[in-house]
Image (cartoon, coloured by chain):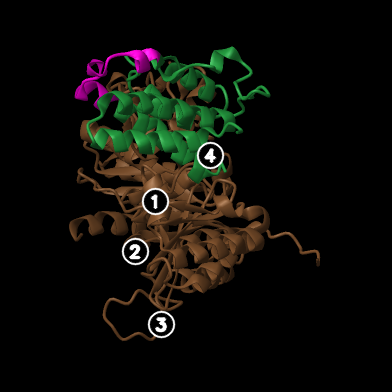
Chain colours: A green, B brown
Amino acid sequence: MPVDYRDAAERHWADAEYLLADSRMANADHLFGLSAECALKAVMLALGMTLRPDGRPTNPQHSLHINNLWNEFISFANARNGAHYALPLSSIANPFTNWDVSQRYDHRTGVTPAVAATHQQGAQIAKRILDNAVLNGDIQ
Amino acid sequence: MTKHLPVLFEKALGIAVEKAKGVGNVFGDEILLVRDLRGRIRVVLPGRYENFSEKQRAELVKFSQQLAESLGAYGFQPDRAVLYADDLIQGDEILVSSDRQLMAFEGGLKIWLLDRQIIGQDWMRAPLQQETKNPRVTFYGIKGGVGRSTALVIWAWQLARQGKKILIMDLDLESPGVSSTLLPSEYLPDYGIVDWFVEDGVGQAEAVESVMISASPLARDLPGEIRIVPAFGRDTGDYLPKLARCYAESGGAANMSWAERLQRMVQDMERQEEPDVVILDSRAGLHDIAAVTVTRMNADAFLFAVDSMQTWNAYAFLFRHWQKHPQVREFRQKLQIVAGMVPETGRDQYLKRFRENSWDLFREHLYDEAGAQTEDVFSFDLDSMEAPHYPLPVYWHRALQEFDPLQDDSGIDEQIMVAAMGKFMTEAETMVFTREENP
């Protein structure tokens, strides 16, 4: 299947919300991080990020998970006429510094409701940026 | 297949509205069209796709197909033509956004447009709440070179002679002018308006707000004062990188429209200075930022014009847009047309023609239909002197062409000033200072 960051962001977001509503914190939290990553990558693609044939970003600098992508997105968007997309991210500190893609191997008690709530907010900000890019027509 | 002419921007919206009407109330009693930055149009429906019935989904397929086919380059592929509010974080906000414009209302179906533009929809929003008490006046010109800045300087001087304290803000950031006429470079404050916006962007406007006002030497020997907030100051440094950051819609961490930021800046200055009147020197043109000073700052607005088709056509663009403004009934009462640079010869003829063209402009776009018998109808006769279309004249005078009162030791020659602007000044003072007493 071809890469579709926008669709991926949307389904990870919807599933994360679904799990959170059922108090399944650990997997909800994992998906909030993936949703935010996909949302930002969808916008980066619209701003000129290129992909290799296998679907990974051409520049390894962009192959990041959200704990590192958050700040990378700010400089990427600012350098490509996307300052208005970077602004909501640069206004707050990266909420995903304590998120890691390998937490899928961890015990479920590692994610507290407070941690999940922080990541939910971060994912919501990223999703809002994606939505704005869609409404602006930068993403079809 | 027959070859169709491409759909161009100005046709696309009408087509989308017609297609939406064709759908009727299948999806509820409201349909929101969103026009993106490039002008392409899609639909946002409430709820989510999964909630629609089989029958509605079949209609959706048809509707998306129709939009895609009829809108050409201004449409989207069928699977991208419709968005669902529940899929968007701000979906519910969008559906009730006060930035929507009602495009059609028939058979119980409301069709709205949300127009996404690069710098938002500031001038279409409601006037801001002014917390300070002083009157405000905007000097606006749809085109440059109509004597706007000269008139502003002379009026300020006249008010200072009466002992008034005038605070002038040079909002013509793209080509700052008033500040250089009133403030020679050695009088500039450390910073100016661009610095306020840049520092406010990182939440520290207070670092510059007490060092961005200077007194103009023009009022040195007068009982009143002319205080200036210039576009830039002595320490502003490189202007363009700051200008490029001025218009961001955020102050500090908060998302805030440009007009709201401007309002905060103006109020900061007003609180510091407590002036008798504030004059906003707006930039020329149809730009959003210029229009904000007319529609949202609670200011009396002098609209400068010369009697040329170019000018009237440009104002017609603006007024046509304002017709759709939700608050047009409030701010249209604060408009006053000014005839700038009225020629020396054939004045009466010129002003008569000006008045007729101005009347046509207002009648067509901003006055209520004549003949209505109610008390508060907003409509005026051609020769009604209190009408907004009835021009306040500023007469052309050779001496004002090279007008630079600070270079010339004599300052402003009173006779010339009265000859050129006497009528304007008397009327303007009545307008601004009596309205304040009877809000």
Lower position in the chain sequence, tag 1 or tag 2 = 1
* Residue A58 as seen in the image, left or right of residue A92: right
Q: Is residue B197 visible?
A: no
Neighbor class of circle 3 (other Cα within 10 Å; few <14, some 14-19, many 20+) is: few
Residue visible at 63% across and 57% down in the picture: B9
Lower position in the chain sequence, tag 4 or tag 2 = 2
Task: Give the magenta part as a residue range.
Answer: A102-118
Residue at mark 1 shares a chain with residue at mark 3:
yes
Distance from label 3 to label 2 (Cα)?
Answer: 16 Å
Residue at mark 4 shares a chain with residue at mark 2:
yes
Pick out the residue farthest to the right. B2
> Nearer the observer, disc 4 or disc 2?
2
Res A19 quadrant in image: top left
- Residue tagged by mark 1? B85
> Nearer the observer, disc 1 or disc 3?
1
Lower position in the chain sequence, tag 3 or tag 2 = 2
- Residue tagged by mark 2? B333
